[in-house]
Image (spheres, rainbow, N blue to C red):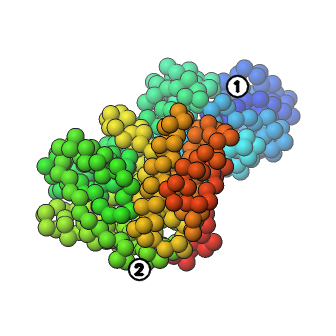
Amino acid sequence: MDLAVGFDLDMTLVDSRAGIVATAQAAVAEHGGHAPTDELAALIGIPLDDMLAPFVPSHLLATTADRYRELYPTLGVPHSRPLPGAEQSLQQVRALHGRVVVVSAKPESSVRMVLERAGLEPDVVVGGLFGADKGIALRDHRVAVYVGDHPGDMVGAAAAGAHGVGVPTGPNDAEVLRAAGAGVVLDDLTHFPAWLDAHVLDRRLADLEGRLAELDSLLVAFSGGADSAFLLAAAVRALGPERVVAATAVSSSLASGELDDARAFAEGLGVRHLTPSTDEMAREGYRANAGDRCFFCKAELLDVLGPLATELGVAAIATGTNADDVIAGFRPGIRAAAERGALTPLRDSGFTKAQVRAASAQWQLPTWDKPAAACLSSRIAYGVQITPSGLARVDRAEAAVRTWFAGAGLPLRDLRVRDLGGDRARVEVDRDALTALDGRADELAAAVAAAGFATTEVDPRGFRSGSMNELLSQPEQFR
């Protein structure tokens, strides 16, 4: 689901009062006029001619406006400052994989100068529009939420069918903004990131339910992780447990304990849980463990689940791929699943990993804070052949690390033991665990050695999902 969020400029994103007032007063003064500061400030946000009209004779209005535009780059722009919360608001839009669209009554060239001065970088800039005319640009760029400080901004949002969000950081108070059509009024932009996060999550939940409800039945490729668990729960809500099947593939790449957890989760939802065997080892590309290993793994999974779904009369298969996965870089497994017709409802609805966890917490799913748990083969360095014994060694090593941390009374959430080839291992733990480990790395290495690795290093950078991809010099060759 595409997301675009729009913002007005003056007194919404940027405090431009001082610059606008100084420029207008200078332009008016050149023609012998006088523009009181308070009166000018109250008119900020409307078209330039309308703002200047009370202070100059009508026959001098065009000339004064032209002079204002000439002076603004030197008198107005240097005074521009981002309002509190502006930068964080743009960051939140991007964290949700959205586009930032700035639509202002100012000429586009002036808008860009002000934004540059304020250190704000939108994706789209449109100038020269006010009131309902803003709706033209908002519609063109599919803006779903428009934030502004002026009644005209709320009119523009309504004209585009966008959700109007008012911020009384300009000359208009909350009552005026609500009367103009604001769906919500926030004190300022510091409150916008949290509001947007909740608003978009609600929209994406509704979108996901709608997509799933259109299906006759669904088989979920259920690894037991947070993403596929949330998808399974959403499918049950939309279709009912009798039209949903969960399938957890069983092979040597499945970490110990994961199957029991997956079974318990599926039983809790009341859905049928299948445990078909997959044989990734039979695929040469998987065993070779080049950069495209995940392609062969996912191909094996879907080639097993496809006939199973047909046999059961289930209409579609879906994976727990989320929107973050798609932009995370090298993901050959996603391509393999797409080639085999697997659906990706979470990705299509725009769900980020953070939103999967937030929604799972709302639904009180036990997987809401479950650490990421990729298959064991993801621990083997590219180029090191995948074998059942190698996977088992990694599994033993991770179990040994968890046991050691528990015995030492130290915190541990995320963990990977990376097989670097031969008898060398690299241990990645989350930042808190890394800090708590202080000075005890040798003890941890001894625990890993007992599992079959002679040489062990603790990565000072901590846990990073997909860190093995850092070792690929040219991942493009595997796409």
Query: Mark 1: which amino acid?
Result: Ala
Instruction: Judge by depth and name the residue closer to the eye, 176 or 350.
Output: 350
Q: Position of residue 78 (x, y in %)?
A: 81, 38
Under circle 1, the secondary element is: helix
Q: Residue at x 20, y 57 (%)?
A: 274
Q: Position of residue 453 (x, y in %)?
A: 55, 60
Q: Residue at x 51, y 65 (%)?
A: 380
Q: Position of residue 268 (x, y in %)?
A: 22, 40
Instruction: Judge by depth and name the residue closer to the eye, 281 or 198.
Output: 281
Q: Where does label 2 land, which residue?
A: 284
Q: Residue at x 62, y 36 (%)?
A: 436
The disc label shown at residue 403, or none: none
Query: Mark 2: which amino acid?
Result: Glu
Q: Where does label 1 land, which residue?
A: 41
Q: Position of residue 332 (x, y in %)?
A: 46, 69
287 lies above or below 22: below
Instruction: Judge by depth and name the residue closer to the eye, 10 or 58.
Output: 10
Q: Quick one: label 1 or label 2, which is nearer the N terminus?
A: 1
